[in-house]
Amino acid sequence: SLFGIGITVDAFVLRSYDAISYTPIVFLVPGLLLLCFYPRKAIAAVGQLTHLFRLPLIVYSFLYSVQAITYYLALERGAMASQMNTLFKIEIVLTIILASLFLKETSHLGKKIIATILTTVGAVLLI
């Protein structure tokens, strides 16, 4: 329910605010709040920064930031939040397909294919 509220607030704010400027604020403020509430944990996390800067995490962070910016740009330019959120859930389908191919998660493959088709049909019907 909080995710739905967050999407609605984002869509409302982006009616009058720039998406490119809004994205860093949205991702920076929660981190700063956590830093205020848990300063000891933040100091301990600094020691682990060398482990964080590996290629997979950098690639993931880059792709996630591109996704966030394009999502907010679509909301800023007038896309309906209900439609955007429905299309955003297509990630479930992509996750199933990629996990089957690359992670060899092939158990219950028939059920996964049926669920993927039903999810896609349901998302299209909601739009």
Image: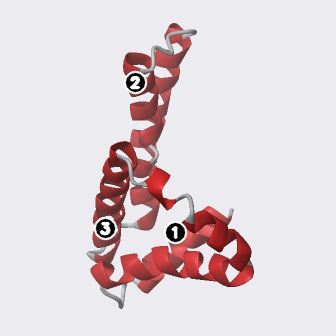
Disc number placed over residue 69 in the picture, else none = 3
55 shown above or below 118: below
**Left of 23 or right of it: where is 89?**
right
Of the residues shown, which amino acid type is indicated by label 2? Answer: Ile
Looking at the image, is 23 positioned above or below residue 84?
below
Q: Secondary structure at mark 2?
A: helix
- Measured as percent of width and height from the top left, residue 54 is found at 38, 48
N-term mark: 3 or 1: 1
Is residue 54 in view from this perspective? yes
Spatial separation of the CA atoms under disc 3 and disc 1: 14 Å
Asked if 52 appears above or below 14 in the picture, the reply is above
Taking the spot 28% from the left edge, 60% from the top edge, the residue there is: 66
From the top left corner, tell me how far across and down residue 111 is, in percent: 55, 13
Q: How is the image coloured?
A: secondary structure
Amino acid marked by disc 3: Ile
Mark 3 vs mark 1: give the one in front: 3
Q: Earlier in the sequence, mark 2 or mark 1?
A: 1
Name the residue that disc number 1 marks. Answer: 7
Disc 1 marks a residue whose amino acid type is Ile
Is residue 111 placed above or below 66 in the rendered structure? above
Mark 2 or mark 1, which is nearer to you? 2
Q: How many discs appear?
A: 3
Report the residue marked by disc 2.
97
